[in-house]
Each structure stands twice: as C-alpha cells, then as structure tokens.
Image (cartoon, helix red, strand yellow):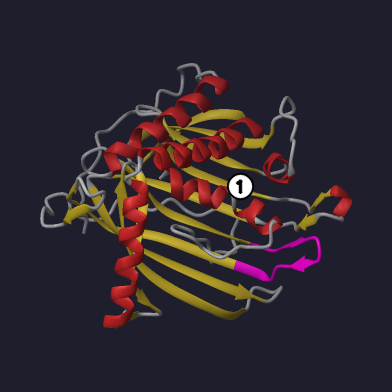
Amino acid sequence: MLRSLQRNIAIAAILLASCCAPARSLAQGISHSAASPHRAAKPGSTAPPAHAANTSAPMPNAAALKQRVLDNLKTMQAEQERYICRMTLVDEETDKHGNVKKGETKTYDMFFVNGIEVDELTAKNGKPLNAGQQKKESGRVQKEIVRDSDQKQVAKEQDENEKQLDILLRALRYTNGHRQKIDGRSTLCYDLSGDPSFHPKNAQETFLHNMTGTIQVDEATGQLVDLNARLDHDVKIGGGLVANIHKGFWLHVHQARQPDGVWINDLVEGKGDARAVLFLHPYFQFQQTIRDCRLTSVSTQTTGGIIVNPGNTNGQIP
C-alpha cells in the first residue's frame, strides 16, 4: 500500500518534474465525477464483522487520528506479504473535453517483498507477453526482488514513502467529522482542506496544501478506507513561472478489507493536466484496479531472491 499510495501522492510532484509515466504501481480514474460511489461487498466474500456506528460518541482528536492512519499504513505492509493480486492499469491521454486520444492497458501480478510492492507485467492491451518479453520482464523483476531484499534499500524506500505520507497528512486538516456505517463497519468521515498551521516549503507541498476533498477511516482498525481529493482552482507555483496545476486535478484512493482482516489498496484513479516550466503535460486520466487477491506463501532465499507459491488459494476473493 505504501509504495502504491506514495507514488500516486507524488504524481503532482512528478508532473512538476515533467515525468508522469507510471512506475511500479500507478493508476488513475476515468471517472469525471469528483466522488466515486462506494462499492458493495463482492458476492460470496466473507462479510466483515459488524461494527455499529455510535453517532453519539465523541469524534477522535484529528491530529491523533492522522498519526494513527500513518502508523497503520506502515504496520500493514508485513500483513500484505501474504497476498498476490492481479493489477490492471489503464493510462490514457485525452483532449481538454475528456475524449481519449491514446491509451494503454497493462496487467500485472502484484506481490510484496519486505513490505515493498513488486509488479510483474503479464499483458499489454489484453495480449499476454510473448516468450521473449516474459524472459525480459522476469529478469527485471528478479533484479527488483534482489534490490528489495537489501535491508538498506528497503529502509531508504520506506523512509521516503513515509515522508510522502506524512506530508499528505500534515498538509490537510480534518473538519466536519461524523460517523457512517460502510460495509457494516463504523467509519470516521471528514472533509479535507489545507491546514492553516502547515506552511509549504516546496512545489509538492504547495500542491497538496491546496487540495480539498474527503477522507474515510475505519474506526476499529484505524485503516484508511477512502481518500478523495481535488483542486477547485488553479495552483501556480512561483507565480506560474515554475508550474501550473489546473483546476479539476483529481485523485481518489480506496482500500478494501480482505477476509482475514488485511487491507489492500484496490483502486487508485484520477485525472488532470499541468505545466512545468516549459513542459506542457497533456490532459491525462488513469485507473488502477487490484482484483483477484489470494493468499500465497513468499519465502526469501539467502541469495536475495524469493520463491512465490500461489498454490494456497484459501483466501481467494471471487
């Protein structure tokens, strides 16, 4: 979750640096709505225990809740290593009216090594990789696995991820808190807006500080359920000389609870356009969906590689 969410939070900063190509895990929404409806539980899946929403209970301290969300995102990484999932990424360039000019769809097998997400490409635009492409991709993934098995590299990447998330949580304040019962669970819901006590120091922080939207947190676990944020006005960095991020830039992140209680990022989507210095980025929209998660066993070898055994499918989600 951390790598996926951090990478999508960093989209704005990446745009400002003029490189917006998806990396290990990126995706965004084809929806033109500022809010995505909550999906009902999948038929046949194990229903989570009901946690009634006690609307009369006082809402938790917002600052403490921010930290709880961050802490839980970090601790959930080890739990995610029990899963392998199918990820689909749709990345499209559009005109200013939202009409698709060109696009690409990629399918990946997603799993975790030392809490770091690894994505192995399996198909492009609905066509499986040929033998040569599979060999090349397998080699790339093995190098990535070795890197992610290096504890120094893991610590470095996790530190960067946590800094990105910390900026997101500190830049925005939670207001109008209330409880809702979502999928049978008590969920804390807040409006998001720039925190006046936060003073942006760079372009990325300025962008995040100007976002507005909503956030939902599972009350029992402190896990992020849904983050929906957008720009309601143009944001100019350096008076517009450094960069412009235009009104309507939108980002939506959703997590789903698996039958054994593990939370996995199942949807990231968004759209927007921006200009960085002399670089004009096209209008874009993207959507990353994660489905068919199943329990697996992943063991690290002394050589730095891993063995992934997806044979245990007791936790498979229809």
| Residue 277, image x, y percentages | 80, 60
Q: Quadrant of residue 50?
A: top left
Q: Is residue 172 visible?
A: no
Say if 310 sits above or below 280 in the image: above
Write down the region rendered in magenta: 272-284
Main secondary structure of the magenta stretch: strand
**Element at label 1:** strand
Q: Quadrant of the N terminus?
A: top left
Q: Could you say which is closer to the camera, residue 84 or residue 215?
A: 84
Task: Give the residue displayed 49% in from the left and 49% down from the top.
Answer: 253
The location of residue 222, given as percent across then percent down, is 40, 29
- Please state which amino acid type lies under the numbered disc 1: Ala
Front residue of 157 and 2:
157
Relative image position of residue 17 (x, y in whole percent): 69, 57
Name the outermost residue toward the front: 303
Examine the rendered structure and indicate whether residue 187 appears above or below residue 19.
above
Q: Is residue 280 covered in magenta?
A: yes
Q: Nearer the viewer, residue 118 or 190?
A: 118
Q: Which residue is mark 1?
A: 229
Say left or right for 89 vs 8: left
* Displayed quadrant of residue 276: bottom right
